[in-house]
Image (tube, rainbow, N blue to C red):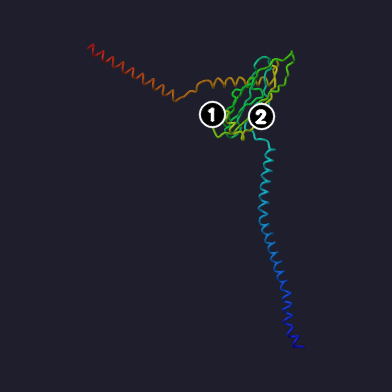
Amino acid sequence: MAIETEQKSPSDGKVWGLFKLPFRQTGNSSSTTTSSSSSASNLHGQSQPHVDGSNHHGSVNSVSSVAKSFLPTRRRLKLDPPNKLYFPHEPGKQGRSAVRIKNTSKSYTAFKFQTTAPKSCFMRPPGAILAPGESIIATVFKFMELPENNEKPDPKSKVKFKIMSLKVKGPMDYVPELFDELKDQVAIEQILRVAFLDPARPCPALEKLKRQLADADTALEARKKPPEDAGSRIIGEGLVIDEWKERRERYLARQLVEGVDSA
């Protein structure tokens, strides 16, 4: 009996081995599944920071763009008066106002006028290009309408003027099409409202307006004069001197011939 027991013991081991084999396979498969899931999670973990970084970068850009939209636009021009155009109120006549425009930026800047009443208002000049630190006095003309049915003139006007600016590369001829070609870079400097002054009542604003209009007229007359060119003047003087020398030489030669003939 002992011998039979010893013979059966190997078979029992084999039987247990056969029963254990599926469990070993199950353990291997579960470990494989666990490793694959862990590798997938690792891959997901590796790819996740990139996605989060891109989202973070996009969110930063969106936040910065929103923040910039709330910041005030940096002005390139300084206006005097800063927010109004003063007109002496004389119904039935054409009034004049003036505004000094100075380029306070470090680059060449173009400016342009626009108005809500182009039929009754015009600007001179309607636009220009200013060098850094350069200023100009622009004159604005407006026809004063007569009040209807003998109504009192309204001291406030609905007419508005908009001044826009545009940064340009350097000195060039001004053309209004610049603002159409580079409209994404155009900045609105100021919207000027019209304010009427009584010409019969002196006030600081009226006196300042008269000085600005006088300066504008002087600058306009200076621009009308042809520029003096020193180089052309020197050439002209040289031509005059050369012609005078030729005349003198001909005169001396004629006197010499006449002296020989008389002898």
Q: Which picture quadrant has residue 16?
A: bottom right
Q: Secondary structure at mark 1?
A: loop
Quarter occupied by the C terminus: top left
Q: Can you name the residue that lies furthest to the left here?
A: 263
Q: The N terminus appears in which quarter of the rendering?
A: bottom right
Q: Amino acid at mark 1?
A: Asp
Residue on which disc 2 sits = 190
Residue occupying the far right of the picture: 1
User: From the viewer's perspective, is 207 left or right of 218?
Assistant: right
Residue 242 vs 62, above or below: the answer is above
Q: Position of residue 117 (x, y in %)?
A: 66, 22
User: In x, y percent, where is residue 13?
Assistant: 73, 79
- Closer to the camera in the image, 224 or 80: 224
Amino acid under label 2?
Gln
Is residue 147 toward the left or the right of residue 213 in the image? Answer: right
**Camera-nearest residue between 172 and 74:** 172
| Whole-number angstrom distance, CA of label 1 to CA of label 2 | 23 Å
What residue is shown with label 1? 173
Tell me residue 43's x, y (percent): 66, 58
**Viewed as shown, does residue 248 lie left or right of 74?**
left
